[in-house]
Amino acid sequence: MRVSFARVSVALLFCVIAGSSCETIPREALKLNKESLELRQMQTRRFDTNDEVNILAACAALIQDLGFILDESETGLGVVVGSKARSAVNAGEVTAAVLCAIVTGVAMPTSKDQMMRACIVTRPFGEQAESVTVRVTFQRIVRNTQNQVTVREGLTDPEMYQEFFEKLSKAVFLEAHEI
Amino acid sequence: MRKRYFLFLVCTCLVVLGCATTKDKLLDSDSSQLQLRSIQTRAFDTTDREKTLRTVIATLQDLGFVIDKADATLGTVSATKLNRYALRMTVTVRPRGETQLLVRANAQYELRSVVDPEPYQEFFTSLEKAMFLTAHGVE
């Protein structure tokens, strides 16, 4: 059967229109859900002190200890942001790529480096602002050997947060309470 | 004759859809400023700017954003959410009259600015809950 030129044209037209409207923001992107609360609890601790600035300074010192470079800070709002670039080379992934290259003759790109970011927000807590809550959030962007971005994610491993707050407790000589 | 007509139609579409200049991209000339502003803005019955900014920051964190910048003097907060996609937001808080604060949110999803009302509505619904205040629409 001979496909009519008109049909091809119409199909092409639809493709053009579909291509131009592109991807849109996911519906749940700005919606609170059940995980939001769990994440908040995992990422937040409360310290019994009313000295917010002191806690914020300790947080800034701690992320420096962890190798982050300070990008931004705003004491008036209790915000400290830092980032660091690290290698993302993963032995398993490289081995798999080498095996794949041997079998297929095609070199697969592997993870090369990553930009990791940490953001700490402090907030007075309680009726008399008698304590301070600290919430830390981490995220990272991974690039592969072809300089393509392969991973963009918020980090949600509970152990990361646990260890961070253990270190913070030691730094401020105060016990970190769960909220 | 019809062949030519269709070919012309397809070419016209390609040209019309593909001809956004750098100026158009830089100044987002294709969107209506006034309409966008009303979609992106709500008024809250409070004058406590610092508390509002702190609540905005907490809400952004609840939504999975990591804060990029915050400025108490200017009343601005910028944040990025990475969840396979990249979503960036700037939220500004400024006084409106003697009794209200205006909160404006701008979002950019991947390479596009977000112009649909729904995502902003979702954001302000989340913010309302955290503020314990009603978000009033602004004309």
Image (cartoon, coloured by chain):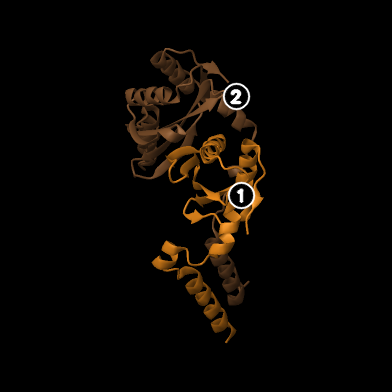
How busy is the neighbourhood of tag 1: few (under 14 within 10 Å), some, or many (20 plus)?
many
| Callout 2: chain | A
Q: Quadrant of residue B4?
A: bottom right
User: A74 or B15, which is in the foreground?
Assistant: A74
How busy is the neighbourhood of tag 2: few (under 14 within 10 Å), some, or many (20 plus)?
few
Q: Position of residue A167 (x, y in %)?
A: 41, 17
**Residue lying at 36% horizontally and 40% vertically, measured from the top left:** A144
**Residue lying at 59% horizontally and 62% vertically, measured from the top left:** B35
Is the residue A12 above or below the residue A164 in the image? below
Q: Report the residue marked by disc 2.
A: A127
Q: Circles 2 and 1: CB distance less than 8 Å?
A: no
Is the residue B52 above or below the residue A60 in the image? below
Q: On the picture, is B2 further left or further right than B68? A: right
Chain coloured orange in the rendered structure = B
Chain coloured brown in the rendered structure = A
**Residue lying at 60% horizontally and 27% vertically, measured from the top left:** A38
Tag 2: amino acid? Glu
The numbered mark at residue B43 is 1
Tag 1: amino acid? Ala
Q: On the picture, is B137 further left or further right than A95? A: right
Name, please, the residue furthest toward the front.
B98
